Image (cartoon, rainbow, N blue to C red):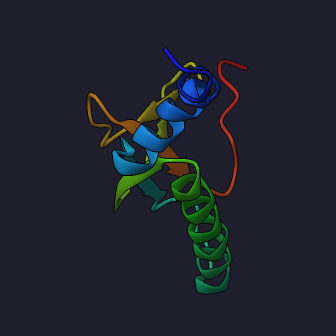
Amino acid sequence: MTRRHLLMAPFAGALYAAERPLIVPVQQIIDSRASLSPRQLQSFSGIWDEATRDLRRCGIELQWTRKTSEIRRSPSGAPIFTGLLPHVINMAVTGSIPLGVP
């Protein structure tokens, strides 16, 4: 091994990562009960686009979908999320955060 290969070894992983990004599936769930205004959704979309762009620069590619669903409450007050998918990051966009059982 030459000095050049030894010194370039830490950068080899970064170069490989740049060629093959990490794919992360994300599902955005818009809460239909939240009554979010179009302006609020537009503001969120701008922030989301910026975050996606920043992650892409780091070698992380978000493959995301968006759908409308709802967050219900059980009789005990615990949140019930509908429309979640397995094996993806499910991200709820809502007007309030249900903190659990009161």
Residue at the (59%, 20%) spot, across then down: 6
Which residue is located at x 64 percent, y 68 percent? 50
Q: Quadrant of the C terminus?
A: top right
Judged from this view, the residue extending furthest toward the top is 1
Question: Which of 17/50 is in front?
Answer: 17
Which residue is depicted at the point 64% across and 26% down?
7
Q: Residue at (65%, 22%) from the top-left corner?
A: 100
82 or 14, which lies in front?
14
Residue 77, quarter of the rendered image: top right
Question: Would you identify the image quadrant in which residue 97 lies?
Answer: top right
Please count the marks in the image: 0
Q: Residue furthest front?
A: 2
- For this orientation, the residue located farthest to the left is 86
Q: Is residue 63 left or right of residue 73?
A: left
| Residue 26 against residue 67 in the figure, above or below | above
Left/right placement of residue 65 relative to residue 55 reads left
Q: Which residue in the rendered view is the most extreme toward the bottom? A: 39
| 23, above or below 99, in the image | below
Q: Position of residue 51 (x, y in %)?
A: 63, 59
Image location of residue 42, percent across then percent down = 60, 81
Give how far across and how far down residue 99 sits, in percent: 70, 28
The answer to which of 44 and 15 lies nearer the viewer is 15
Q: Percent from the top left, x then y, of residue 66?
A: 36, 62
